[in-house]
């Protein structure tokens, strides 16, 4: 094993410098629940670990007039205990909360789950569905990108050397807007999604859908924004015909693999079923707003 | 590579140690500090045998670097009893025979203690979900759950007095 160094800077600039200067692989560390496992298995051999949790702005949730600002390395336990965010976006919080055990929730972060770049990452679909953005700091300053622009393939991201995510911006819900996330696993806990579906809808006062985003996980190399599935909801109430169209469109958006967790046919079928169910929950929540 | 010097609080006592960057907190506890109560099961965060409390949250010490403990408050299984007096969760594990080989027991007790620190009246379902990150391959889980719920009942009765 090449020798590994560890640093725990207290400012974003120090972290950028450390990450950018390292000649070999340098990894930002948030909760470490994926990174340490991959180091132990030998899949990743970094020469520098930069612990981001001593940088104050990377931990915690700030509620502003029109958005939530979530520090990139905030652990799951702080996120699901945040009542404002849980009320505003139950789907985002339930997606993150599905990841791992209580022990994992004590450490795991949104940025880690995103940048681990697993197609099955449970916190990602509802973030994309809510049009959340990531603020990325790097040697060339800061830039903001939609969450769906970060992951480019399994284990791969669009972040350049020296860049890391400092925070996420999640717009506040409009009147009659809400979300839901559902995943399918063959047991009740502690498993990786066979399919995950995030649905975010906005209704008018008559319960008619005016805006919708449907995002699928674990059915393609990256999360999929299923535009056709979202469009199937817009202009409609949640009747049988709309649900059938949503189901079919969600299935068409899938490009899954066969693996031990599910076959291609099975994943396509389940994506449609979960899209129906998540849409029903999101509509019900939105109608109550 | 130069070792990192770490100052931390473990079970209420200030502790200093030197560690290499890749050493996990579990490695440090067991190999440097001779606190061998925390067990190494899977080394991947699945089994919970290495559970410790870090700044109030339960974590797998196999998924935390030793260097990250700088300035944190860590509680391990060795700090759960008050001197010779067992914590109610420990006492109830004995009374309910909630263990066979005992390897998973420290992790279960630390996790259960953390649950009761924040909720003295958990439902069976809440308790089972809370302990879902702790695996036991001997007893099945019923005796463990009963022991935790009984400890909670005893602590509630104690708190009411």
Image (spheres, rainbow, N blue to C red):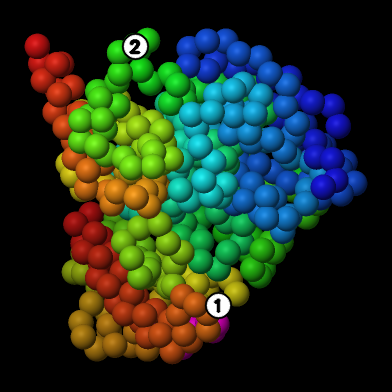
Q: Name the residue beneath numbered marker 1.
A: A220
| Type of secondary structure dominating the magenta stretch | loop
Q: Position of residue B1 (x, y in %)?
A: 86, 32
A219 to A27, vertically: above or below: below
Q: Residues within 10 Å of mark 2 (few under 14, many from 20)?
A: few
Q: Residue at x 44, y 67 (%)?
A: A193
- Letter of the chain that mark 1 sits on in the rendering: A
Q: Which stretch appears magenta?
A: A250-257
Q: Is residue B11 left or right of residue A52?
A: left
Check if mark 2 and mark 1 are on a common chain.
no
Q: Is residue B127 above or below residue B3?
A: below
Name the residue located 59 percent from the left edge and 23 percent from the top edge. Answer: B34
**Residue A219 seen in the current view:** yes
B30 and A281: which is toward the camera: B30
Specify whether B117 is left or right of A111.
left
Viewer can see residue B25: no
Query: Can you tell which quarter of the image residue A181 is in?
Result: bottom left
Pinpoint the chain carrying mark 2. Answer: B
Residue at the spot 40% in from the left edge and 57% down from the top edge: A190
- The circle on residue B84 is 2
The residue lying at 55 percent from left, 82 percent from top is A257
Q: CA distance from mark 2 to mark 1?
A: 56 Å
Q: Is residue A35 magenta?
A: no
Between A281 and A96, the one lying in front of the other is A96
């Amino acid at each position: 094993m090449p020798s590994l160094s560890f640093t725990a800077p207290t400012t974003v600039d120090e972290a950028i410098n450390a990450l950018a200067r390292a000649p070999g692989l340098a990894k930002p560390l948030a909760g470490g629940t994926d990174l340490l496992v991959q180091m132990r298995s030998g899949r990743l051999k970094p020469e520098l670990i930069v612990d981001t949790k001593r940088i104050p702005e990377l931990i915690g949730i700030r509620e502003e007039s029109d958005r939530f600002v979530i520090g990139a390395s905030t652990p799951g336990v702080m996120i699901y205990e945040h009542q404002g965010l849980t009320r505003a976006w139950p789907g985002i919080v339930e997606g993150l909360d599905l990841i791992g055990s209580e022990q994992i929730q004590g450490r795991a972060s949104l940025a880690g789950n995103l940048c681990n770049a697993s197609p099955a990452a449970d916190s990602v679909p509802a973030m994309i569905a809510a049009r959340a953005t990531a603020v990325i700091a790097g040697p060339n300053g800061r830039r903001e990108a939609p969450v769906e622009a970060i992951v480019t393939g399994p284990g791969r991201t669009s972040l350049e050397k020296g860049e890391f995510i400092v925070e996420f911006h999640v717009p506040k819900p409009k009147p009659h807007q809400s979300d839901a996330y559902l995943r399918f696993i063959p047991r009740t806990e502690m498993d990786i999604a066979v399919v995950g579906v995030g649905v975010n809808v906005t209704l008018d006062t008559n319960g008619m859908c005016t805006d919708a985003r449907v995002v699928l996980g674990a059915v393609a190399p990256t999360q999929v924004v299923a535009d056709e599935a979202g469009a199937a909801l817009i202009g409609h109430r949640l009747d049988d015909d709309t649900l059938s169209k949503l189901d079919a469109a969600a299935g068409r958006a899938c490009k899954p693999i066969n693996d031990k967790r599910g076959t291609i046919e099975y994943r396509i079928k389940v994506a449609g079923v979960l899209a129906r169910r998540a849409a029903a929950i999101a509509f019900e929540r939105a109608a109550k707003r | 590579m130069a070792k990192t010097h770490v100052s931390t609080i473990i079970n209420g006592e200030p502790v200093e140690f030197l560690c290499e960057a890749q050493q996990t907190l579990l490695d440090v506890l067991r190999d440097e500090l001779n606190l061998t109560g925390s067990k190494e099961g899977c080394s991947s965060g699945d089994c919970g045998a290495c559970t410790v409390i870090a700044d109030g949250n339960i974590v797998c010490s196999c998924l935390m670097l030793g260097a990250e403990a700088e300035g944190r408050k860590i509680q391990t299984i060795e700090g759960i009893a008050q001197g010779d007096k067992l914590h109610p969760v420990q006492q109830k594990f004995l009374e309910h025979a909630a263990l066979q080989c005992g390897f998973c027991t420290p992790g279960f007790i630390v996790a259960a203690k953390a649950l009761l620190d924040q909720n003295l009246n958990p439902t069976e379902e809440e308790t089972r979900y809370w302990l879902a990150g702790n695996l036991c391959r001997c007893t099945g889980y019923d005796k463990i759950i009963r022991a935790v719920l009984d400890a909670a009942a005893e602590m509630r009765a104690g708190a009411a007095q």
